[in-house]
Image: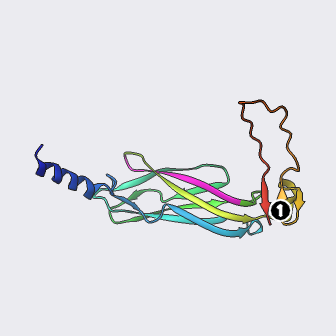
């Protein structure tokens, strides 16, 4: 391969590396719900994508990482130049504290996967805090007061956790 051919091939690869074969551009691949109270109930958000490709495409399916997040999406064909959206609802009931979830979106004939990251902070209701963090120490609430580790054996790692909620 000549030096000029190599440079031309390199420029071609760099020019098209940012585009998927389908030509889909996600306007955002993350969503921050911010801080909200558990008592406010489920929170909803959405992200959008644009079909910049020469052909129609579709959203095949959407899958969330847990049952606390439900996702819906634009159904049907997305023509070139059209916009589609993925809507999601997070249910904070019994889930005080920070959260980080994701949604996988499968698009086009190639079933290309795009991951949408969701995050936020839930200020818990007193009932949720009392059931999940019953130990109160000033502004800090703990899931348990102590841990029983049993025998500690050299060379064997053991992990236990005390979950905390800072009020």
Residue under the image location 54 percent in, 65 percent down:
46
Q: Which quadrant of the view contains residue 156?
A: top right
Residue under the image location 30 percent in, 56 percent down:
55
Residue 71 screen position, x and y as percent? 58, 56
On screen, residue 57 versus residue 69, left or right, reads left
Q: Is residue 78 above or below residue 64?
A: below
Question: Where's the N terminus, which quadrant?
Answer: top left
Residue 62 screen position, x and y as percent? 52, 51
The stretch of residues the image draws in magenta is: 98-109
Residue 59 screen position, x and y as percent? 44, 53
Q: Which quadrant of the view contains residue 53?
A: bottom left
Helix, strand or loop at disc 1? strand
Decide: few, some or many residues near mark 1? Use Cα within 10 Å; few <14, some 14-19, many ≥20.
few
Please give the residue where the numbered disc 1 appears in the rendered image: 140
**Residue 92 seen by the camera:** no
On screen, residue 54 versus residue 119, left or right, reads left
On screen, residue 26 versus residue 147, left or right, reads left
Which is nearer the eye, 54 or 125? 125
**Residue 58 seen by the camera:** yes
* Helix, strand or loop: magenta stretch: strand
State the residue lying farthest toward the front. 154
């Amino acid at each position: 391969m000549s030096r000029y051919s190599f440079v031309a091939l390199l420029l071609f690869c760099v020019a098209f590396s940012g585009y998927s074969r389908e030509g889909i551009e996600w306007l955002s691949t993350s969503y921050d719900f911010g801080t909200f109270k558990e008592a406010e109930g489920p929170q909803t958000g959405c992200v959008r994508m644009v079909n910049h490709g020469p052909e129609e495409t579709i959203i095949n399916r959407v899958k969330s990482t847990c049952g606390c997040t439900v996702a819906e999406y634009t159904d049907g064909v997305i023509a070139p130049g059209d916009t589609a959206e993925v809507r999601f609802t997070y249910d904070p009931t019994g889930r005080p504290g920070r959260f980080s979830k994701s949604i996988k979106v499968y698009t086009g004939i190639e079933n290309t996967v795009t991951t949408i990251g969701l995050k936020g902070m839930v200020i818990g209701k007193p009932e949720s805090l009392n059931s999940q963090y019953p130990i109160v120490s000033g502004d800090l609430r703990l899931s348990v007061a102590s841990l029983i580790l049993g025998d500690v054996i050299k060379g064997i790692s053991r992990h236990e956790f005390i979950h905390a909620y800072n009020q």
